Amino acid sequence: MIRFAQQKKAVAGDVNLTPMIDIIFNLLIFFLIIAVISQKGLNLTLPKTSTAEKRPPKSLEITVTDDRRILFDGEQVPEAQLEQRLRLEMDRVETDRAESIVLKADVDAPFGMFVTVMDTARHVGLKNLVIATKRKTSLEPSP
């Protein structure tokens, strides 16, 4: 009988995963950068003062926009429901409760609406109100 030499097929023992890992890390970095860049905040022009200070660490934020919207920690709230939301904050345990309420208003926001928000917060019992402003640079003229 004639014996034929058996040919062994070469089996790849290792697969090089380095290019795939590089691509995955590049995609991850790309999506993280895009996510950070694409987050759009509220475009608000704060009034400028020379006595502006940093925001208190544990605080809530109420914003009055120039188009007459009220935002309670970034969430739009109708003016009629603002008192209810503030009462819920007052009912929280003292350790969870915000130490202060930061009031922000656009330069072009209606002053009457800002005063109404401030009055509502004080009526509920929130006394530590902070009015947010932007620090005035020394080059800007005084009004």
Image (cartoon, rainbow, N blue to C red):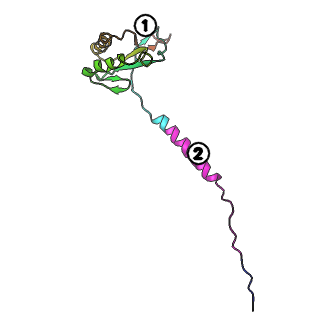
The verdict on residue 90 being magenta is no
**Residue 23 makes an appearance in the image:** yes
Quarter of the rendering containing residue 8: bottom right
Check disc 2 and report the residue beneath it: 25
* Mark carried by residue 142: 1
Q: CA distance from mark 1 to mark 2?
A: 51 Å
Q: Is residue 36 left or right of residue 113?
A: right
Few, some or many residues within 10 Å of mark 1 (<14, 14–19, 20+): few
Residue 109: x and y in percent read: 31, 18
* Mark carried by residue 76: none
Q: Earlier in the sequence, mark 1 or mark 2?
A: 2
Few, some or many residues within 10 Å of mark 2 (<14, 14–19, 20+): few
Residue 16: x and y in percent read: 66, 56
The C terminus - image quarter: top left
The N terminus - image quarter: bottom right
Mark 1 near mark 2, Cβ–Cβ under 8 Å? no
Task: Specify start and end residues of the magenta stretch as a single range.
Answer: 8-34
